[in-house]
Image (cartoon, rainbow, N blue to C red):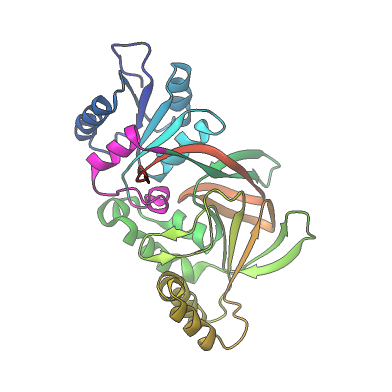
Amino acid sequence: MEEPVSDESALAAVVYNPVKVDVARIRAAVATAAAHAGWRDVLWLSTTADEVGQAQTRQALDRGATLVVAAGGDGTVRAVAEALRDTDASLGILPSGTGNLLARNLSLPLTDLDEACTIAFAGDDRAIDIGLAALTRADGENAEHAFLVMAGLGIDAAMMAKTRPALKRRFGWLAYVDAGFRALPESSKVRLGIALDDDEERSAHVSTILVANCGSLPGAIELIPDAILDDGKLDIALIQPKTVLGWLAVWRRVTWENRVLRRTSLGRSIIRMTDRGQRTELIYLRGGSIRLTVNAPEPIELDGDEFGDVTAIDFTVGHQSLVVRVPRQATVH
């Protein structure tokens, strides 16, 4: 729903999810940051249940906005970014909700609204990649969607489908733990085909597969530590533990090893000394394009949102096709 503005030449816009944010509080913080940064006017556009951000962003661009600020959860940020891809306009982020996945990976403030607004209206521009997922349904229907952080198929997607909205609103990211415990007993491993770039297809039997643009998650989880936001590549995590001990090994790797030990030379030495051979519970791959196929329809999630069941997915990268506002870098004299 568009709200009236005093100046038809507004150059900045805020696309906000009224369910996720305190609108009055955000309006006040935006007004201060925009005025200090010299923006003449701000166009306010609310998302709805049917229009989650793409249409509002296109409307803002049509009005001449060169900065579009997404105020909401990961779904709002993803939708706004999808419409901003390959344009000259910048994306500002005012994080809200449970995950704030892209904001975490960009080191944006998650709890300081005033600082987030300052960055959105006066920060530096950084060009980053966007992941693109071309989905094929069982009936042959095709659709392409963007994602900023990661896509998941297998237990990961089943968890998203089982997350209770009321629990998510009350406890945030911990709601996914509840969903995980409920999804795990019902899940079985997924047999899939995977082809990287121009390589031949190989088969895999996994609990879940994640295709990532960046790799940090809430809860001190460094899922894919080598993922880089602007390298033109997608990183893949094949998670395939065979036992409960295998799941514990995966957990240890994505928390203690990836987040702590890998950061120092001593820690990396400890990893090498304690690694008793090839570890198959968690395997990393990388490619500029990826094709996944499954024999039976499987659920897919993009940045934490469900996107239904698919039989095939073609992943590609929009290399540095999104400009996002990040904290200003100190000037070196």
Is residue 89 shown above or below 224? above
Is residue 256 shown above or below 297? below
Residue 121 location (% of width, % of height): 33, 32
Which residue is drawn at the image coordinates 69% and 43% (left, top)? 139
Number of numbered tags placed on the structure image:
0
- 122 inside magenta stretch: yes
Asked whether, in this view, residue 116 is left or right of residue 191, the answer is left
Residue 196 location (% of width, % of height): 71, 57
Asked whether, in this view, residue 58 is left or right of residue 71, the answer is right
Q: Quadrant of the N terminus?
A: top left
Residue range (magenta): 98-124
Residue 305 location (% of width, % of height): 46, 48
- 220 inside magenta stretch: no
Residue 86 location (% of width, % of height): 57, 32
Q: In the displayed orientation, state which residue is furthest to the right.
A: 200
**Residue 296 occupies quadrant:** bottom right
Which residue is drawn at the image coordinates 48% and 17% (left, top)? 62
Is residue 274 shown above or below 47? below
Q: Nearer the viewer, residue 150 or 213?
A: 213
Q: Is residue 247 visible?
A: yes
Is residue 48 shown above or below 171? above
Which residue is drawn at the image coordinates 36% and 45% (left, top)? 333
Asked whether, in this view, residue 237 is left or right of residue 14, the answer is right
